[in-house]
Structures are given as C-alpha cells and as structure tokens.
C-alpha cells in the first residue's frame, strides 16, 4: 500500500552547531488579508544531516521523514547551493595583519 509522497521544502541553513543536525529556515511571502501587502513569514525546521556536510548559509532541500528525535522530523536530501566563505586580510601601515575573524 503506497504511503504517498513526502513533503519537501527548500531553505537556508541557519545553524550547524549540533552533531548531525542543522537548523533550516524557510521564508515564504504571503499577502496580508486586509491590506494585500506582501509579508515575509519564516519558519525553522531541524533536519538530520547524517554526514555533517552542511554549513551556515547553504541552500538545501529537506524532505519529511519519520521522527528521528524529539524535534527532528526532516532530513537533508541534497545541498542545492553551497555558501562560499571569504576570509579577508587587511594590511595596516605598520605591516601588522588584521584578520576578518579577529573582529
């Protein structure tokens, strides 16, 4: 007996500090009922990342699954777009290097 198709969502990874878990934020726009102005609504989901490949800023596809833990009901299906981190170094007049991470 087929169970139906699992729901999928596309979102951005906001946190990857937990082991094998990422927090994914999904932003949707809806129209206000009275004023018809577009409003952004966001929701967060905890998703299972088995191989710890996701990093903050990655765009991922998550798919609904059976409960993995108390709060995890989704798993990362694929990484659509990886965030490229840039480390900038600025040289001071006194030849000391100021790194972007020290701030």
Image (cartoon, rainbow, N blue to C red):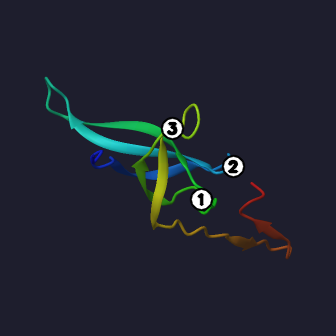
Q: CA distance from mark 1 to mark 3?
A: 23 Å
Residue at position x 85%, y 72% in the image: 96
Q: CA distance from mark 2 to mark 1?
A: 12 Å
- Name the residue carrying label 3: 67
Q: Residues within 10 Å of mark 3 (few under 14, many from 20)?
A: few
Q: Is residue 62 rendered to the left or right of residue 92?
A: left
Residue at position x 80%, y 74% in the image: 93
Q: Position of residue 1 (x, y in %)?
A: 27, 46
Residue 92 location, quadrant: bottom right
Q: Position of residue 87 (x, y in %)?
A: 67, 69
Q: Residues within 10 Å of mark 2 (few under 14, many from 20)?
A: few
In what element is the residue under mark 1?
Answer: loop
Q: Position of residue 22 (x, y in %)?
A: 57, 48
Tag 1–tag 3 contact (CB < 8 Å): no
Which residue is most to the front? 1
Q: Residues within 10 Å of mark 1 (few under 14, many from 20)?
A: some
Q: CA distance from mark 3 to mark 2?
A: 17 Å
Q: Is residue 78 above or below residue 65?
A: below
In this rendering, which labeled residue sits more in front, label 1 or label 3? 3
Q: Earlier in the sequence, mark 2 or mark 1?
A: 2
Q: Is residue 54 above or below residue 84?
A: above
In this rendering, which labeled residue sits more in front, label 3 or label 2? 3
Q: Earlier in the sequence, mark 3 or mark 2?
A: 2
**How many labels, in total?**
3
- Name the residue carrying label 2: 19
In what element is the residue under mark 2?
Answer: loop
In this rendering, which labeled residue sits more in front, label 2 or label 1? 2
In what element is the residue under mark 3?
Answer: loop
Q: Earlier in the sequence, mark 1 or mark 3?
A: 1
Picture disc at residue 55: 1
């Amino acid at each position: 007996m087929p169970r139906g198709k699992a729901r999928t969502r596309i979102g951005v990874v906001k946190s990857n500090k937990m082991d094998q878990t990422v927090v994914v934020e999904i932003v949707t726009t809806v129209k206000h009922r009275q004023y018809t102005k577009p409003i952004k609504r966001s929701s967060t989901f905890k998703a299972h990342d088995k191989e710890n490949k996701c990093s903050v800023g990655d765009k991922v596809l998550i798919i609904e699954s059976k409960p993995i833990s108390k709060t995890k009901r989704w798993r990362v299906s694929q990484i659509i777009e990886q965030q490229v981190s840039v480390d900038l170094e600025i040289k001071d007049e006194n030849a000391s290097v100021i790194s972007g991470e020290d701030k």
